[in-house]
């Protein structure tokens, strides 16, 4: 079993990992990020060795987890972030800030991605509080 968020029960983590496997996504376990102990070194003969930089592995794993979460939310009829007339940058910024407080980096990453893809910045906390 990989890292379990304090707010994610072991049962919820097992269910999430099963969904990821069913979708053919790579393991999100922190144990599989390509680090080696002192007596190991990468070998080009070993197909289990991932020679990518840990940053690249982490971004790929995070993006895969983001896709799973977005697919989950689409199945619950959530969407519309790409429609600037229906969903403002202020609203996305407010959601991002709320999810920072909830402690889920995956949700924060998804809201940040939405703003990034729209070419927008995160609204200041003052603007969010004012609703401007």
Image (cartoon, rainbow, N blue to C red):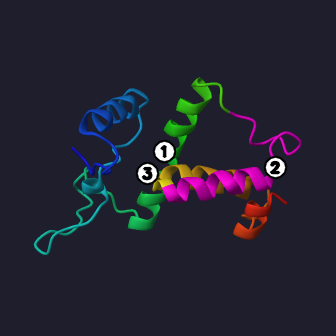
Q: Position of residue 110 (x, y in %)?
A: 59, 50
In magenta segment, residue 87: yes
Quadrant in the picture for residue 53: bottom left
Q: Quadrant of the N terminus?
A: top left
Quadrant in the picture for residue 75: top right
Residue 70 placement, left or right of 102 = right
Q: Residue at x 62, y 55 (%)?
A: 96
Q: Residue at x 28, y 40 (%)?
A: 9
Q: Is residue 39 above or below residue 75?
A: below
Magenta-colored span: 79-101
Task: Report how far apart the C-alphas of labels 2 and 3 lie in the structure.
Answer: 29 Å
Q: Disc 1 or 2, which lies upstream in sequence?
A: 1
Foreground disc of the pair 1, 2: 2
Q: Nearer the viewer, residue 56 or 66?
A: 66
Q: Residue at x 43, y 51 (%)?
A: 61
Q: Is residue 60 above or below residue 22?
A: below
* Marker disc for residue 88: 2
Residue 46 placement, left or right of 18 = left
Residue to which mark 1 is pinned: 64
Q: Position of residue 11 (x, y in %)?
A: 26, 33
Q: Is residue 53 visible?
A: no
The residue furthest bottom is 38
Q: Nearer the viewer, residue 81 or 55?
A: 81
Q: Is residue 29 visible?
A: yes
> Does the residue at mark 3 contact the one at mark 1 (Cβ under 8 Å)?
yes
Query: At numbered mark 2, what does the secondary structure look like: helix, strand or loop?
Result: loop
Task: Report how far apart the C-alphas of labels 1 and 2 lie in the structure.
Answer: 26 Å
Residue to which mark 3 is pinned: 61
Circle 1 Cα neighbour tier, 10 Å, few/some/many (<14 / 14–19 / ≥20): some
Circle 3 Cα neighbour tier, 10 Å, few/some/many (<14 / 14–19 / ≥20): some
């Amino acid at each position: 079993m990989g890292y379990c968020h304090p707010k994610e029960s072991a049962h919820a983590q097992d269910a999430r990992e099963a969904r990821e496997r069913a979708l053919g996504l790579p393991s999100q376990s922190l144990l599989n990020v390509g680090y080696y102990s002192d007596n190991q070194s990468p070998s080009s003969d070993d197909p289990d060795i991932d020679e990518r930089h840990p940053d690249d592995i982490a971004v790929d794993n995070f993006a895969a987890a983001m896709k799973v979460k977005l697919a989950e939310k689409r199945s619950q009829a959530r969407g519309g972030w790409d429609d600037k007339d229906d969903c403002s940058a202020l609203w996305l910024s407010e959601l991002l800030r709320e999810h920072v407080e909830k402690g889920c980096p995956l949700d924060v990453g998804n809201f940040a991605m939405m703003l990034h893809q729209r070419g927008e910045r995160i609204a200041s906390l003052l603007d969010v509080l004012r609703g401007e």
